[in-house]
Image (cartoon, rainbow, N blue to C red):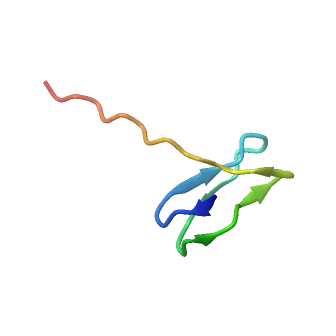
Amino acid sequence: MATLLGKRYVCTQCGTEILCTKPGQGTVECCGAELQVKEAKPVPSSD
């Protein structure tokens, strides 16, 4: 898996978050596990 520019990655074990500023091949790891891409929060609708 390649790291994606502008994506936030989060560790599911300790909660550490990183922001990718330079994309490339490979993976990002923390606590011995691969970090997961943090999902965007839904924007509340304006009625």
Along the horizontal axis of the image, is 46 left or right of 30?
left
* Residue 12 percent across, percent down from the top left: 72, 40
Q: Quadrant of the N terminus?
A: bottom right
Q: Residue furthest top?
A: 47
The relative height of residue 38 versus residue 6 in the rendered view (above or below) is above
Residue closest to the eye, 24 or 36: 24
Residue at 74%, 51% in the rendered image: 34
Residue at 86%, 52% in the rendered image: 32
The relative height of residue 8 versus residue 43 in the rendered view (above or below) is below
Residue at 78%, 41% in the rendered image: 13
Residue closest to the eye, 23 or 47: 23
Q: Residue furthest left?
A: 47
Residue closest to the eye, 4 or 47: 4
* Residue 42 percent across, percent down from the top left: 36, 34
Report the label total: 0
Along the horizontal axis of the image, is 18 left or right of 11?
left
Q: Quadrant of residue 28?
A: bottom right
Along the horizontal axis of the image, is 41 left or right of 7?
left
* Residue 47 percent across, percent down from the top left: 13, 24
Along the horizontal axis of the image, is 39 left or right of 34?
left
* Residue 33 percent across, percent down from the top left: 81, 49
Residue at 79%, 55% in the rendered image: 30
